[in-house]
Image (cartoon, rainbow, N blue to C red):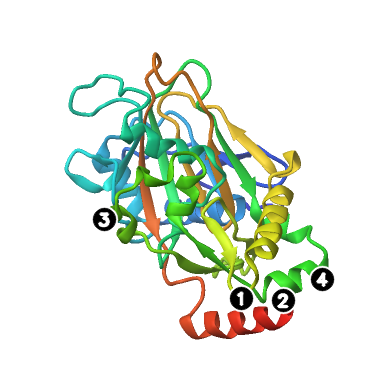
Amino acid sequence: MTGQPYRHITVRPLHPLFAAEVTGIDLTQPLPDDVFAEVAAAFDEHSVLVFPGQRLDNDRQIAFSRRFGELEVMLKGVVGEDRHLAGISNVDPKTNQIIPADHPRMLRQYGNELWHTDSSFKPVSAKASLLHGREVPPSGGETHFAAMRAAWDDLPAEKKRLCERLVAEHSFVYSRRQVVKEDFLTPEEKAEVPPVPQALVVENPRNARKALYVASHAERILGWPEAQGRALLDELLAHATQPKYVYTHRWRPWDLVMWDNRATMHKGSAYDYRNHRRVMVRTTVAGDAPTITADEVRRREAEAATLAA
């Protein structure tokens, strides 16, 4: 990775390819513009930032997150009354008791243990996610991150040319069907999240670095037979999640971890859901635009059908 000089923050790499710890700042207080500019530069460079020991409340987490852009409104998992906050937790915020492991709220969360990028099943997918560890279990519950820019860089040139010509369809229903029975979601819930097309390769507009854009939500390649598209998606997923591309974060209380959904995948690890509390609060920064236009989707789908034939 290229070195970046910082005057106001200390940045310590956590992995040879990506991910860094940022210290020297207090996120419970508003950051001056020059300090925030360094945090934003570190984010563009490292894709995953860990801010240890940040005792944020909901308002301060929202305020810091909003420095990066507009926040998504959550469909589910609301914390309190603010729909900009999602609870990734096995604790009921109303009763403060552990939720039964077979409760629908927990079944929904088990899909987080698949490799994914947040909100890739939405027409405008997420730019960044910020997850705050309010309570962490004594073991398990780690979050794994995959370096999708490095995975892209290492692909053969011919495979890169192919991927840049293709569109994947992402579906929340498809990904959840991998971990729970198909009728887990009601017809009304399925209607809220219809499948959407996404480019198979995305680019960070601030530094022009490209990354593979695949995840558990990616169901098929538009224009290709199902089996052929599934084989390519599985191949790319296996390539990107090789150990050399993966950083594992072991949570400490009050860690804030921020990641670039355009440059990483992530997944959670299981823990003792029945006996250990895990309370995490997520804010999500919305993307600026779809990864691909409707006209380009149609053009690539037609070209893909020709390639497949």
Q: Nearer the viewer, mark 1 or mark 4?
A: 1
**Cα distance between the residues tagged 1 and 4:** 19 Å
Q: Residue at x 82, y 69 (%)?
A: 157
For mark 4, does the 10 Å Cα neighbourhood hold few (<14), some (14 to 19), or many (20 or more) residues?
Answer: few
Q: Is residue 264 above or below residue 232?
A: above
Q: Nearer the viewer, mark 2 or mark 4?
A: 2
Tell which circle, 1 or 4, labels the residue nearer the N-terminal end. 4
Residue position for label 4:
158
Q: Amino acid at mark 2?
A: Ala
Q: Is residue 266 above or below residue 286?
A: above
Can you tell which mark lies on residue 308? 2
For mark 1, does the 10 Å Cα neighbourhood hold few (<14), some (14 to 19), or many (20 or more) residues?
Answer: many
Q: Residue at x 43, y 53 (%)?
A: 173
For mark 3, does the 10 Å Cα neighbourhood hold few (<14), some (14 to 19), or many (20 or more) residues?
Answer: few
**Cα distance between the residues tagged 2 and 1:** 8 Å
Residue position for label 1:
223
Q: Assign a secondary structure to mark 1.
A: loop
Q: Assign a secondary structure to mark 2.
A: helix
User: For this rendering, which residue is in front, 229 or 31?
Assistant: 229
Give the x, y percent position of residue 88: 37, 35
Do callouts 3 and 1 mark residues in contact (Cβ within 8 Å)?
no
